[in-house]
Image: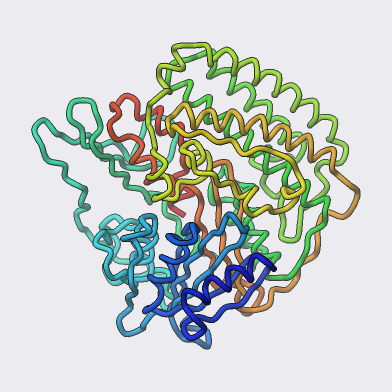
Amino acid sequence: MKKMEDIIEELRAGFGESCLNYNIVHENEMRIGVNEVDVRRMAELLCRDKGMKLACMFASDETLLPSGEFAIYYVFADAERGAFIIARMAVDSEKMSYPSVSDFIHSASFYEREIHDLFGIKAEGNESLKPMVFHGNWPEGEYPLRKTYDRSRKPAFASRRQEFMKVKGEGVYEIPVGPVHAGIIEPGHFRFSVAGEPIINLEAQLYFVHKGIEKMCEGMDFKKCFYVSERISGDETFSNALAYCQAVEKIAGVQIPRRAQITRVIFAELERLTSHLGDIGGVCLDIGYGFATFQFRMMRGWTYQLVEAVCTSRFLRSVNTPGGVRKDFLEGNEKRIIEMMIKIEKELLETIDIIKAKSLYIDRVENTGTLKKKTAIDLNATGPAGRASGVHYDVRKSFPYEAYGDMEFEVSMHNNGDVNCRLNVKLEECIQSIKLIMQGINMLESGSMCSKIDFLPPYVSALGYTESPRGENIHWIMSGENNDIYRYKVRTPSFCNWPALCEAVRGNIVPDFPIINKSFNLSYAGNDL
């Protein structure tokens, strides 16, 4: 509680008692009420003066609640003190607008555009509110996340031209790529502005696979909604399900059993290990380094086989459940897991020694696709993308969840921000994941696997958060009246890191784009929702 008291005193010093009210919930979440007049000053105080970051921002239609209003929520992360400050601002129903903070919190611009598309609430002062979610075929004046929107009705088809940034100059031309790509990947359109081969600007148009997940979950039973959370992005199944479960467990006031906490850590690290091995192998494939490609694919195959043998699902589906873990998947499998981790670690260390001595590898990844630290901070680049650029932030350390607070591991950090650094972070995290898995196996103690949850108190909200393989993952839930979901906000790390990718490619040549892109390895589905 001491850390919360410190934050309260700082807020009082900046605002006084007259313009803000607060309460502390779920141990490390502070809720603040703020008005339009003070929201910019509050954001400046927390981000500029106190060094916090805007972890998430979203709107909620609460016109069906006693307040009868729309609200904007700002989630600020205080990594030093392990606390989240969630500021709620009511929106004037006549103006349907609010003051933008994007002029000094650059990452806020993307949230403000999303809110404008889905709710029709305008951020005054943001000059870049061009459509982000919809591609010109969505009718104007239709806002799907308002409670009055009838989702059973098929919207009328509209046709408006999509505008891209025009880069002018002698010899400058555009290269449109996608949305359909070679290979089995999801759709996204990339508009390159180039002069010869160097890339001057890249604009990414996403949301071709927007599924309306947040709308779909409104009014859905919380147990059923869990299965939706698992299917947001296939290779982050466990991380998303875990963040969802955390939020539900906080709302229900349930503490999960110790054995379940450790089990969750082990599976979370298996997901990270599998993801990173695939990423590194993918970069080696784009480089044309066949030996390394097959080495990393072989090791990833081993992790898939292990996970399938232990829990029957290569994507770790139906392992989590609100309240804990569905069954004791680890019982009798401890030796199998330890042996596989020893085998992978040996193969991985030998492979690292080989590729680090290969000029074919080093020449293509060093000083390619550099994301500068200031840019990474401005865009809230998260996960390996942020840590490779010198941003010291890992949810597992700053906001320890499950059993991470009782485990020893190092956060991998690099400073150059290039493809090499992103791969080094992932290689080092593979080693740390192996150590965490073996540490978790040795920490296992007997006990139950799940605390039963049958009831959610109505209109209570909570935050779930994980460090997924791609970075910080945030799920916010407000419960409804009948054990259902009133509002479900998902912000995966890909939402933050797509803009960072567009910055990292500038000044590089077009043939290096696949390598830079794969070093981030972002999820289309995880962004598009």
Kindly give the residue lying farthest to the front in the view shown: 13
Residue at 51% of width from left, 51% of height from top? 492
Q: Position of residue 79 (x, y in %)?
A: 57, 55
Which of 466/146 is in front?
466
Image: 63 above or below 363: below
The quarter holding residue 265 reads top right
Q: Is residue 413 left or right of residue 373?
A: right
Q: Is residue 81 left or right of residue 280?
A: right
Q: Position of residue 92 (x, y in %)?
A: 36, 82
Residue at 73% of width from left, 73% of height from top? 455
Q: Is residue 151 visible?
A: no
Kindly give the residue lying farthest to the bottom in the view shown: 66
Q: Position of residue 33 (x, y in %)?
A: 50, 78
Image quarter in which the N terminus is found: bottom right
Image: 230 above or below 407: below
Q: How is the image coloured?
A: rainbow
The quarter holding residue 478 reads bottom right
The quarter holding residue 148 reads bottom left
Q: Is residue 314 left or right of residue 98?
A: right
Q: Is residue 302 visible?
A: yes
Residue at 54% of width from left, 15% of height from top? 355
